[in-house]
Image (cartoon, rainbow, N blue to C red):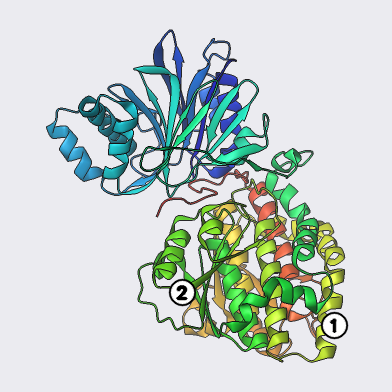
Amino acid sequence: MCGIVGFAGKTKCIPIIYSGLEALEYRGYDSAGIAYIYNDKINIIKEKGKLINLKKKLDFDINSTIAIGHTRWATHGNANITNAHPHQVGKFTVVHNGIIENYIELKNKLSKKGYQFKSETDTEVISALLDYNYKLEKDILKAIDKTKKELIGSFALGILCSDDIKDIYALRYSSPLILASFTNGNFLASDIPAILNYTNKYIILENLEIAKINKETITIYNKDLKEVKHSYHTYNGEKSNVQKNSYEHFMLKEINEEDKVYKNTINSYFDGTLKSLNENFGFLKKYKKIDIVACGSAYHTGVIAKSLLENYANIKVYTEVASEYRYKKCFYDKDTLVILVSQSGETADTLAALRKAKNDKIKTLAIVNAIDSSIAREADYVLYTKAGPEIAVATTKAYLAQLTVFSLITLYLAYINNQLSSKEIDNIIKDIIKLPRLIKKEINNYQIYYNIADKIYENKQVFFIGRGLDYANSLEGALKLKEISYINSVAYQAGELKHGTISLIENKTPVIAIATDEVIIDKTISNIKEVKARNAYVIYVSSINPKDIFYDDFIKIEKVHPILQSILTIIPLQLLAYKVAKNNKCDIDKPRNLAKSVTVE
């Protein structure tokens, strides 16, 4: 959520800042702005809406070499120019990711000191607080240090002070910031893509550290204002991973990468032998109860994992939404493991849930995509998915990678707990090996899904139904459709239709029915026939050929072991959602009101 880029160097900075903001568009935003130093003065240009609106107001030839930029996702106040970042009060200009929980109290205090506020934001309050503390301390570092002790919440800050036009200052707490260097200067940024045009080496700024950046050096001070050194990390991914190449949208590109993502994730933990599973997942065998905590699509992988782990590994699993979990009373015991799932590794509610578990002395496992992210670094154990950078806000390949890790965990724990026969294990391993080919086959069947999308895209309401594991798949299918097409799509347990939901079925209402579980497929089909009898438009998604015709369209997916089936089931639903959104001329990669990395509560 939101993007920060700062640069102090020996070359014109506005093109560098703008390209960095472009690279961070995927994080979600609704306004943007830049503050740059020119003629010994801080100049601010900002605009609401897309970056192209800001670009029209910028002079890329201005000989400025120091600037900070920001893409804002509105939290406090509407998305307009007044509320857009940067914010300037007195001598201090600030860009901010995060949320300040006590900004009202601070605002009231500063108003009594004579400060006046133009915006509705918490960020403007930070600028004023810095200015006030600077008047007291007469020193920029000490003013920043004093300010950080008064802020409650999460913050990543890029700071300019008119009394020091050679330096940019940075500060973070519970919201990520990285620092980087290249030949012509130094960076601060909220994520790696912003720097990849210039370098793949970066420093992670730790909580409550302050950095001072100029064209020559990066100096980092710890929470006691003592100078510290950090080693550089190296991003080893391909730059092409953050480019669309020949694809119309990042989402389509990322769906087409899913076979490689699956293969890379599998190969990281499994070489075809049970020994490799034990080497990578052996730490899991002592836990008898698991809490899976996540948000959004990551939560849906947890719902699938719950079904798999309970049915095949005989382990009790609770799946919790992180924003609720962090405030609820938890009943832990010494054999409980809390698994946190997050694509970005920075999801605020999930990070808070992790800290809650650690505070209660409970072991934690992070399943994340972002190396060196906060959740990865703070968890007791970490398993990385190998999706590479995911730019589209609506997750596809990262979701599939999370499912892949949970499938391997299920296989390992089922094996350790003697819940599978040797023959069944052998069959699962065979399916694991052939799955990349089957994933590609599902992707290549896109025209089938596109033809169906052409029939339903004008509907205002779509229902997904399923039972057991298929209901879990329905949750993600419904979310994918609603978040990028803005159609009200909702998932229901098929058996619950008669308890109220079926009253919503009208003539030609699309119902996407998922049925891959042979044990209960007849029950699911009975429910499908109920909605068909009320003239629903039924899209049947199954790995099992139907015995009769009770549907309008049939999406046949390849059949594999249930531990792996969800990996194939989700692909048609992703591509169906994509085409519906495209038909409706939606902003597929950057849906309205959504952010890629939700770093505020």
Near-viewer residue (55 or 505): 55
The percent position of residue 548, horizontal first and vertical second, equals: 79, 84
Please tell me whether residue 317 is drawn above or below residue 167 in the rendered image.
Answer: below
The quarter of the picture where residue 507 lies is bottom right
Q: Secondary structure at mark 2?
A: loop
Mark 2 in CB contact with mark 1 (< 8 angstroms): no
Q: Is residue 278 left or right of residue 76?
A: right
Q: Residue 533, image x and y in percent?
A: 63, 81
Q: Which mark is residue 427?
A: 1
Secondary structure at numbered mark 1: helix
State the residue in front, 241 or 552: 241
Q: Is residue 506 above or below residue 106?
A: below
Q: Quadrant of residue 92?
A: top left
Q: Which is more N-terminal, label 1 or label 2?
A: 2
Question: Which quadrant holds the C terminus?
Answer: bottom left
Mark in the foreground, 2 or 1: 2
Hey, what amino acid is under mark 1?
Asn
Tell me: 147 left or right of 598.
left
Q: Amino acid at mark 2?
A: Ile
Residue occupied by mark 2: 362
Number of numbered discs: 2
Where does residue 361 sit, x and y in percent of width and height? Answer: 43, 73
Query: In the rendered image, which quarter is residue 131 located in?
Result: top left
Q: CA distance from mark 2 to mark 1?
A: 35 Å
x%, y% of residue 231? 59, 41
